[in-house]
Amino acid sequence: MNYRPEIDGLRSLGLLAVIFAHAGFAAFDGGYIGVDIFFVISGYLITKVILREYAEGRFSIGRFYARRVRRILPALFFVLICTIPFAWMWLLPDAYEQFSKSLMAATLSLSNIYFLRNTGYFSPETAEVPLIHTWSLGLEEQFYLLFPLLFLFRLKIRTIFSIVLALALGSLLLSEAGSRFFPVANYYLLPTRVWEILLGSICAFQVFGKDRRTSDVLAAAGLSLVILSIFLFDPSLNIPSLVALLPTGGTALILLFASQTSVVGRILALSPLVWLGRISFSAYLWHQPVFAFWRIRSPQPPSTIVMCGLIALVLLLSALSWYFVEQPFRGQRVRFAKLACAACALAVGLVGFGAWGDVKEGLPSRLPNNVREFVDRTTWNDNCLFQREDGIPALPSMECMFNIGSGRTIAVWGDSIGASISPALQEEFKRRNIGMVQLTHGFCAPILGVSVARDEGAANCEEFNRRALDYLAASNVETVILSASWVSFLAAPYMQIDSEVYANGAIPLQSIADNLRETVQRLEATGKQVVIVYPAPRFDKPVVDLMASRMLRGDPTPSFEFSKADFEANTGRAYQLLNSGLPQDVSKVLPEQLFCDPTSKGGCYFGLDGVAYIADRGHYTRAGAERIAAAVADELFGADGITGSIPLPLN
């Protein structure tokens, strides 16, 4: 097969798009489509090799698998092994347990299935997931396992092409439906992604046995489509879908019509681009662990200069692993029998090591005693927090009713933030011989007719809220406390308001405010008093991680300060919603009065003297929840000597 340097240049374009997107450069928000470019190229190159051997009567599925093993496993296993020491040193138990599971999944080519069940690809948390990018390798390896089977039955090439064409069309239509109804599964799984790889296969069928026609115009159109997609797409687009035909179709046009003599071919065949394309597999493997571990270790997001330095480090590591790992194994210098035995042994070792971290719940014994004890107590309560998989419970649920029968009852209605403060509220009310009912559902703010859309976690929200309000209206509950992760709620990519779906940026905030006001007024119309807990910030990094990392550096009683300016910027949109949507008589609990210095010079402390008030990025620890609960009690019953404010450090 004749070498085409412009294909390596095209690979480098996809690689740079992915790297710059994961580096956080806003101009490359659509850089994730670099993976779609890789899929088309892979389908093209692999199918060309298979077709040539098949036509010559020497196709061997064993030889095909051997080539894939040589191409993928040495570099993949090398990078996986290199990530382990940094995970061991820097990840706290929960994160290390998740890393261990992802290590097993990456080794077994199941990463896409694992991350489908555990992580949305575009959630902010994925920036600190070292192996999130291996989902695409898992998907490709599943394709490599199945695709050659088409050639085992000695069918005519024309028949095989018809099957490939039908599979590609069916997958494309399924992906369009998936983008609307199951976007997360649509993103990760082979049935809705395979059309992109098969598009490359179709290109290979088109040129097989023929003189390839070239066209400067069509090749330039293809390159334009790819570049425009990188800069115009953003994560709000549900990919794959029909819209993904723009970058994948552009890639196909380049594969079909570019040549070394065309303008596009000469551009893509420039030496720096070809070099990047040749190391692109190693660079793809290295970039996410390097970025993620830096973000994990650094208390602040990396600056542009730091990120440029990390990209340079990625390229250096990629060049070294390409030369010393990829190249020696891709040829015949290492006998396949030895390579297969070594790969099996490494796979067993990696899976075993991952299973150890999983079974031992993140191996907390790795940490010093004081850090381990801090992590153990820095948690948040999720009792009675219903999730989509629980279905719609009968409300109220008996196990979520506390101290009932005292004659007075207060309800907590909200999402996981409401769940995190509920135990402290329960104790606060029990001391006053007041019962409490907890009505909390994940991803579900207590607003009728408003829910996060296209997120499977929020699938039952609208029905849950309707049932919660029906119960509250008919009950003897005196007071309803509304609490939610307001900042995260408003940052959702899509919102459904009264059955209409809006993308973020086009969400009518006033419509949500109107629905919130209607919800509160319906509660008040049945004689309920309403108290609302205003938002605390949504932090970029888990507070437990920030404080634990300072303990690891030698500070036994760290604090976590957050500036007032950042507090206001972080919560500003949520405050706008609540201030415009709430009736004047609603009682309010304001976290800035509990955690912030009232003077203009002071900051906000969400961790103080070794005690964290937030566990992760937003959920209250027991200590933080007690501050909220005391403030709620002050609001309901008047000050009784218990203050919700925290002592601030002396300057």
Image: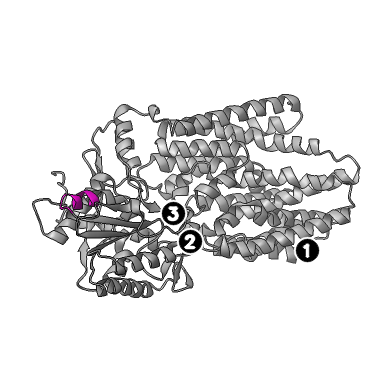
Kindly report which numbered mark, 1 or 2, lies closer to the viewer in this rendering: 2
Q: Is residue 494 left or right of residue 323?
A: left
Residue type at mark 1 is: Ser
Q: Quadrant of residue 483?
A: bottom left
Magenta stretch? 425-433
- Which residue corresponds to the image point at 69% horizontal and 65% vertical from the top-left? 221
Magenta region's main secondary structure?
A: helix
Residue type at mark 2 is: Ala
Quadrant holding the C terminus: top left
**Secondary structure of the residue carrying numbered label 1:** loop
- Which residue corresponds to the image point at 30% horizontal and 69% vertical from the top-left? 473
**Secondary structure of the residue carrying numbered label 2:** loop
Label of residue 459 in the image: 2
Q: Is residue 557 left or right of residue 70?
A: left
- Which residue corresponds to the image point at 70% horizontal and 35% vertical from the top-left? 69
**Secondary structure of the residue carrying numbered label 3:** loop
